[in-house]
């Protein structure tokens, strides 16, 4: 039973950013095998000048190495909040996408305006952060496979 609290979480950690941002962090939440979505990602963006709070529809494209996990569509950003001078973007990732990320040597996230297909930001995992993310993701995949 899900009481709205994550079963496990990867606390936010720094990520590499493009010049338009001054800082970015990522947090990952897993709500258990009974939840509808697989994983919830939170991007904490500093220096985005409130561009994601504009009311437009934004989405992300994730890459495992050089392979786009979805070529024809974006993962929709479900919510955008503001806190402590940062914009917080939330989106969900499927188990299959998580498995691709675990198998990759590098990963990045691109943020787009869905209607115009304009790319706004590119965020990359640092090498140490990616190793930590992969350990966490492997644990989630093991839990999910055990309860299937």
Image (cartoon, grey):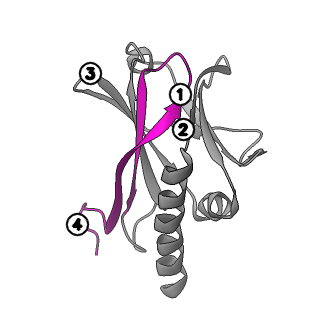
Between label 3 and label 4, give the one nearer the viewer: 3
What is the number of the mark on residue 76?
A: 2
- The 10 Å Cα crowd at callout 3, few under 14, some 14 to 19, many 20 or more, is few
What is the number of the mark on residue 3?
A: 4
Dot 2 falls on a residue whose secondary structure is: strand
- How far, Cα to Cα, is label 2 from label 1? 6 Å
Dot 4 falls on a residue whose secondary structure is: loop
- How far, Cα to Cα, is label 2 from label 4? 24 Å
Is 101 placed left or right of 12 in the picture?
right
Which residue is labeled 1 in the image?
Answer: 58
- How far, Cα to Cα, is label 3 from label 2? 23 Å
Between label 3 and label 2, give the one nearer the viewer: 3
Is 99 placed left or right of 82 in the picture?
right
- Image: 51 above or below 97: above
- The 10 Å Cα crowd at callout 1, few under 14, some 14 to 19, many 20 or more, is many
Q: First in sequence: mark 3 or mark 4?
A: 4
């Amino acid at each position: 039973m899900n009481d709205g609290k994550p079963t496990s979480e990867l606390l936010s950690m720094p990520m590499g950013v493009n010049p338009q941002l001054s800082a970015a962090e990522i947090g990952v939440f897993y709500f258990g095998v009974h939840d509808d979505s697989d994983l919830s990602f939170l991007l904490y963006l500093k220096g985005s000048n409130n561009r994601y709070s504009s009311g437009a529809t934004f989405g992300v494209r994730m890459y495992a190495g050089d392979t786009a996990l979805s070529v024809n569509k974006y993962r929709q950003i479900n919510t955008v909040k503001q806190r402590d001078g940062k914009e917080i973007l939330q989106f969900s990732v499927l188990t299959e996408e998580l498995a691709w990320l675990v198998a990759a040597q590098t990963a990045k996230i691109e943020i787009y305006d869905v209607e115009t297909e304009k790319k706004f930001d590119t965020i990359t995992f640092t090498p140490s952060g990616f190793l930590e993310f992969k350990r966490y993701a492997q644990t989630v995949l093991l839990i999910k496979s055990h309860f299937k």
